[in-house]
Amino acid sequence: MKNLHGFTISFLLLKFSLILSCLTEPLCFWRIKNSEDNDGDWRSDCGFMLSAMEGAADYNYSGIFDFRLSARKYEFFLIMVFATEEINKNPYLLPNMSLLFTFIVGLCDDRLGVLDEIYPQQNNSLFFANYICELEPICDVDLTGPSRKTSFKIAINSRTPKVFFGPFNPNLSDHDQFPYVYQVATKYTHLSHGMVSLMLHFRWTWIGLVISDDDQGIQFLSDLRDEMQMYEICLAFVNMIPETMQIYMTKAKIYDRQIMTSTARVVIIYGEMNSTLEVSFRKWRYLGAQRIWITTSQWDVITNVKDFTLDFFHGTVTFAHHKGEIAKFRNFMQTMNTDKHPLTISDSVLGWNYFNCSIYKNSNKMVPFTSINTLEWLALHKYDLVLSEEGYNLYNAVYAVAHTYHELIHQQVESQKMAEPKVFIDCLQVASMLKTRIFTNPVGELVNMNDRENHCAEYDIFIIWNFPQGLGLKVKIGSYFPCFPQSQQLHISEDLEWASGGTSPQVPSSMCSVTCTTGFRKIHQKETADCCFDCVQCPENEVSNETDMEECVRCPDDKYANLEQTHCLQRAVSFLAYEDPVGMALGCMALCFSAITILVLVIFVKHKDTPIVKANNRILSYILLISLIFCFLCSLLFIGQPNQATCILQQTTFGVFFTVAISTVLAKTITVVMAFKLTTPGRRMRGIMITAVPKLVILICTLIQLVSCGIWLVTSPPFIDRDIQSEHGKTIIICNKGSVIAFHFVLGYLGSLALGSFTVAFLARNLPDRFNEAKFLTFSMLVFYSVWITFLPVYHSTRGKIMVVVEVFSILASSAGLLGCIFVQKCYIILFSLESNFLQN
């Protein structure tokens, strides 16, 4: 019968291998050909039945089972051995009683749906190998896990208390559907926030997500999206892996293409092992998807691959509930009595390790069952002496049952029912007692079976690297405390010891776009995630002193952006100063021309009785020369640091004195015309008109300009302004004209006077008089027009100090033109051509 059972198990394993081979062809990702990879063992469930009996029990585990047992399941077996022996040696827990366990038949070796046959959902009665209907019924407690699927199968319609030691599953908390099922694991509260905090720490903003297409996966996706949106982290893709293998196979290539082509270097995996999600995960690792995998503790898979690259992208970052270390368990493993705890395992373990896609061709070469030493088997599989999270949960589950039995015995003592045998028949009473158990385990952790949703659950963060021949390195890199202040929740080691034995020089990045450095800002691309953007340099005089800035910050007016546009520098104040070469040159020119004009005036005054001075109306000549002196001197108001007074005087003095000068020229031309054309009878009347009319012209023209300047000063006077655009890094202090209309009206009025003077002088140019200056007046007006017509476009095309330079130069040039064209020839005659300076009859 035993041989028949062994043959059945062997046949089932072979059949399962054939199914896997068919599912994975032609890629054959489940096993690499001729490889020693043994990470293909699905984490299928394993179950134990706990019971209590009176007296001490020296239980021998030899020959307890003869089917293949993976390393993870063997961990559960050893935990059961350790926990039950520890409890049985404790005189304060279940005194005078022994806690025993057995395997649940068909669970630890379920590969081909054996449970569907043994535990059909419609069958209300369960069959166990050690359950004998003829004996008095005893309510034992079943421990199942770590996958929920198998636990669902045996939990539906069951009336036996069951403790699930796998990861917390909300569905199993539905006591209407599963009234006898309890969970010992702590719920993953704040897990999404912890993962997002880790991403923020390493600046990972472009994340892939792979989840199971079930209620848990959808809820996790919702929580994760909410957290990511708060911190501007984007999902590059979301793969929702269907639970059904048939549906998964139709979309497997789409998932593979997505994971292999995505630029996201960090991928979150959330879901159960022993599922299509695990199939995808192992397939991607075989295909060489070098990613940082962020997941929960159940995914800390150590693989046996020969070809590897010592790269951070080969690491798996896991979040695990913080748990105390059971030092006695490590000592138990190292000092275990191999005579008392042997394990019969078939050589199919080794055959599985060397499994390849052609096994169905060599199925006749199966090696018969043999026994090997337990510690040799442990060494072969590099067994981890540190408990997994599921193992720790199983340890707590055993103690939860022990405390439940202990409380029931205590109640029997109080109710004086000690005459009855110490057996527990009422499963409802056992389940009710189990639900309310609160105890402290030997590690010192408080375990509350009534509420496993710890809102302040502490997480340990590990990173796992895989090396050839099944060597794995699991390093704790930090912790996460969800109930601490925001700045203290995540703790990551500053000096991480990587697999190479040194400190990582740089943490890899996972971004859709390269980080925008200082001096640049982000411009988001159309129809893409917020994390995808282009980097453009900040506009002129704007800076960004941080990376990935949405908008640049404009510098204040008294500052300017440096060349890199990373920070603002203080501007230097600039104006057309006398110290500047240009300012010095213009100032010297103004003084020189003023001195020359004064000299001409002195010459005219000294020779006031000469014919050439008298013939050209010496009073008008004096007025013209004096106005030109002030025209030259008013240009000095434009040089030096401006203030409010100089800004007002600049335009008004320029306008008034030039009006006097041009109106005087107009008066001179009118005098010439009147001298030859006036036919008014009477010598006295003719003389009065010749002398009075020109003076009235000057007075009236000047008054009009004074009124316009007064209106200008009242409505919108000039003011001090700062030009920050003309010269980089400098603030140029200039005088703003105030009303541009008033400024151009002043210029237009001067132009109209000059045009009138030019017209009259042009008409009088050929009048018969030896000292007729109409030709010189005409030419002076041409020079004046040329200067100011050139001035306007040049003035409006320049900025800053150059504007001031152009205006000063125009004032000096036009004034010098009037001086030269009208008075140079006269001075020459007065000084050097005396024979010409006489009256001719």
Image (spheres, grey):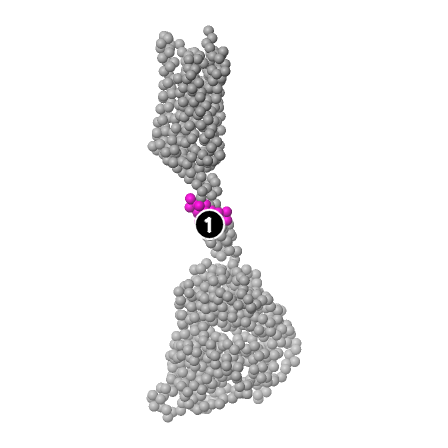
Task: Identify the image quadrant of the N terminus.
Answer: bottom right
Give the camera-side residue of 781 and 59: 781
From this view, report whether residue 558 is shown above or below residue 52.
above
User: Is residue 102 shown in magenta?
Assistant: no
Looking at the image, which residue is at 37% across and 13% down?
Answer: 689
How many marks the image carries: the answer is: 1
| Residue 145 seen in this snapshot | no
Report helix, strand or loop for mark 1: loop
Relative height, residue 719 to residue 303 (above, below): above
Residue 839: x percent and y percent? 46, 9
The magenta-colored residue range is: 553-570
At x 47% / y 78%, what residue is drawn?
326
- Residue 12 percent coordinates (x, y): 58, 80
- Which residue type carries mark 1? His
The x, y position of residue 479, in whole percent, is: 46, 68
Residue 363 appears in the rendering: yes
Within 10 Å of disc 1 (Cα), the crowding (few <14, some 14-19, many 20+) is many
> Which residue is at the front of the view, 753 or 344?
753
Q: Quadrant of residue 286?
A: bottom right
Q: Nearer the viewer, residue 392 or 358?
A: 392
Quarter residue 452 falls in = bottom left
Residue 211 appears at what percent x and percent y? 50, 67
The residue that disc 1 covers is 567
Residue farthest along the top direction in this orientation: 841
Query: Residue 565 lies in magenta, yes or no?
Result: yes
Tell me the residue at 46%/74% (across/down): 167
